[in-house]
Amino acid sequence: MSRRRVLQAAAVALSGAMLWPGLSRGADDTTFYSGPELGAQLLRNVVRIRSQDFDEHGFGLVVAVQMRHVLIATARHVVVPRAGAEPPGFDPSRRRIEVSLCAGDDSGVPYREAELETGFEAGGRDIALLRVTRPAGYAPLERALAAESTIELRQEAWLLGQEQQCGVAPRSGAMAAVNPAQQNLRIEFPGVRGGASGGPAISGYGVLGLITNADDLTFTVLSIASLEARVRAQANGAWALVDARNIPPGDPRAAEVDLAETLNQFLFNAHNLQGLLLQPNIPKPLYVTFARDYNAVMMNRYALASERHDGTLRRYWPETVFTQWQALRVHLWSIHEVFRALNAGDSKLIFDTGQAPPEVQDRMRRLEPELLQLRTRIAEFLHAIGQRAKP
């Protein structure tokens, strides 16, 4: 059995022994999805758009929800005919814009009537803002955006919809140009036939911007920073999206951040649980909380992070750093074995009496120097991975 399987099995065993379900990843944690994995998450923020009055279609990005409405940014030409291209008999007072959420709408309503925010001033940009009735229980993924500092040439990118089909496009593209003066990006998407106007383009770090034009398989994307500034300047509460705080696995910073967060969380929660079990009186709610949080670190963080960065450490750091990591996780596992030894009988006694059995307290006292040594080794390891030469 692999170390990852052993770790997962041990975390499950600990949960069963201590009798606490309901583990979840902390809302503030960094995530480490690949670009397509992040894109699948972000489909909650994508909508399909049909302008029935002049036979145009495309996509949009949910940028905020209000009590009764969802606000959607899209390319203006998807919902308003370009000047001089209006079809015969076109009447702007009788718009028929229909919107369908790609994910997160369980109402069974295939399309909803949307209204154009006529007071929104695009400043000459090909963007528009729509308002549509909010489905019951719907909420977008607010952690969605790519920070400007992550954008670079030849970076891999993806579409989240094309030709009226929601989903991560099967072929990725690459960043071809960044034009800060024009506040747009150029991304090459070979093999993509179009039909993606108004929808988001993403990297492995989050949403890069909205697609406003496609020419010879090179897409023009209005930067998300420019879109955010325009929306925020005109409408209070019309923007809820923030940094996705996702680092794709190929970036060595994923190893730095993931291992730092994981190790610090383990140390913090192990100290909490060990210290609590040494107290003369152990309140049941506190015991449940501390053990649940410790268990969550083992199952949701360490079980995933323990081996996933081995290749990255070997590629970007000296071999001594990987050796240091191997020794550190052996030490951490030996400490975990002490907590894993807690069984259902121990937990029941603690619940019933509000005290830890003498043998449990003895194990916790012997654990103190081990935790102090682990703290030192973690600090040394994090210092070592922080010395990576930046390109």
Image (spheres, rainbow, N blue to C red):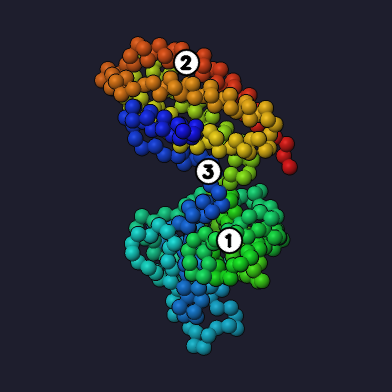
Q: Which mark is residue 143?
A: none
User: In the image shown, does 98 or 121 lie closer to the viewer?
Assistant: 98
Type of the residue with mark 1: Arg
Answer above or below: position of 286 versus 25. above
Residue picked out by circle 3: 31
> Would residue 178 be found to the left or right of residue 224 on screen?
right
Residue 212 appearing in the image: no
Q: Where on the picture, by quarter, is residue 94?
A: bottom left
Q: Most extreme residue toward the bottom, as rendered?
A: 88
The mark that comes first in sequence, 2 or 1, is: 1
Q: Residue at x 53, y 24 (%)?
A: 330
Asked which secondary structure carries label 1, the reply is: loop
Q: Residue at x 64, y 40 (%)?
A: 252
* Image location of residue 205, percent across then percent down: 59, 50
- Please tell me whether mark 1 or mark 3 is closer to you in this view: 1
User: In the image shown, does 203 or 64 lie closer to the viewer?
Assistant: 203
Count neighbours of disc 1 (C-alpha within 10 A) and say few if under 14, some if 14 to 19, many if 20 or more.
few
Residue 69 appearing in the image: yes
Q: Residue at x 36, y 55 (%)?
A: 137
Do callouts 1 and 3 mark residues in contact (Cβ within 8 Å)?
no
Answer above or below: position of 29 versus 240. above
Asked which secondary structure carries label 2, the reply is: helix
Do callouts 2 and 1 mark residues in contact (Cβ within 8 Å)?
no
Residue picked out by circle 1: 171
User: In the image shown, does 358 or 93 lie closer to the viewer?
Assistant: 358
* Image location of residue 19, percent across then percent down: 32, 30
Q: CA distance from mark 2 to mark 1?
A: 52 Å
* Image location of residue 141, percent across then percent down: 47, 52
Residue picked out by circle 2: 367
* Image location of residue 262, percent across then percent down: 52, 33
> Would residue 185 be found to the left or right of residue 329 on screen?
right
